[in-house]
Amino acid sequence: MFKLRYRPDGGLTGWLFLTPLIVVLAVLALIPVLYALGLSFFDYNVLRPQQNKFSGLANFNAMLQDERFRTALFNSFRYVVVCVPLSVVLGVLAALLLDHELPGMRIFRALAITPMMVMPLVVGLNFRMLFDYQDGLINWLLSRVLWFERVHWLDSPDGAFGATVIMELWCTIPFVMMLTLAGLKNLPVEVFDAAKVDGAGKFQMFFRLTLPLLMPVLTVVILLRTLTTFKLFDQIYSLTEGGPGSATETISYYAYVLGFKRFDMGYAALISYVLVFIIAVVCLVLLKILQAERKQA
């Protein structure tokens, strides 16, 4: 029988097979990344190409003095601090509720992941109608059913931030729930049976067994949620457009404004690289913390 064998000394033949992939990655990923890095050192505006010139660290100096950039940076961290813990906690709770083999549970699980299938732009436009001050369904329920005052969801900084958080949670809780539910299905049943025999209660089993065993899955979930929340753009673009003013503007949205509204491509490239650097540092620190907690557990 013919068998495929791995040969570590493949030599030139192996590189020839890898060449198409290397070329595609270089064209689609490496070249644009390096081009954007070089662009960040230029005063480059597509509306005045005759005035484009090398500016060195001028864009970096401008960033340090840019109040709007500091606001966008603060908003990005604020979304991470608020949205990531809430989505993880609520997603885990939803997974625990759906981790039962009851009649019709498969239908509930399918409906629960529906928000993941809707484009963020479409979600944002629908939530904009829901949060409308005069005709929105949410204010109608608050004023007519619960007898509260109408809320200026999209007209005030705090209201717009809260509306964005609600929409972000609606979109991301199903993702956390799905991964957590998959992790729950793969937990060893024997460990829980032994704990029941020893008289452990549900809360003891959850905090002493379920959570520690789920930590590899939750580590991936937290890292992915941190990464996607730092890059928050679609929801901001479709719901608040960074407003009112720049109250909900993130770094991603600010880079979009610089590049595609002001056409200041050099400064936008620098802001984008700063975002990549921040995400890398935060994820590395978070990974170290989570790994240390897993070792202690």
Image (tube, rainbow, N blue to C red):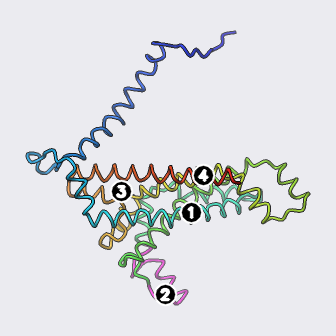
Whether the residues at callouts 1 and 3 have beta carbons within 8 Å, the answer is no
Report the amino acid beneath label 1: Ser
Judge whether residue 290 is colored magenta: no
Question: Is 100 left, or right, of 180 in this rendering?
Answer: right
Counting residues from the start of the chain, the first of labels 3 and 2 encountered is 2
Distance of mark 3 from mark 2, alpha carbons?
A: 35 Å
Distance of mark 3 from mark 4, alpha carbons?
A: 24 Å
Report the amino acid beneath label 2: Ser
Vertical side of 147 occupied by 214: above or below: above
The stretch in magenta equals: 130-150
Q: Does residue 188 appear anywhere in the picture?
A: yes
Counting residues from the start of the chain, the first of labels 4 and 1 encountered is 1
Q: Does residue 44 appear anywhere in the picture?
A: no
Counting residues from the start of the chain, the first of labels 3 and 4 encountered is 4
Q: Residues within 10 Å of mark 2 (few under 14, many from 20)?
A: some
Vertical side of 215 occupied by 87: above or below: below
List the residue tagged with mark 3.
252
Distance of mark 2 from mark 1, alpha carbons?
A: 28 Å
List the residue tagged with mark 1.
87
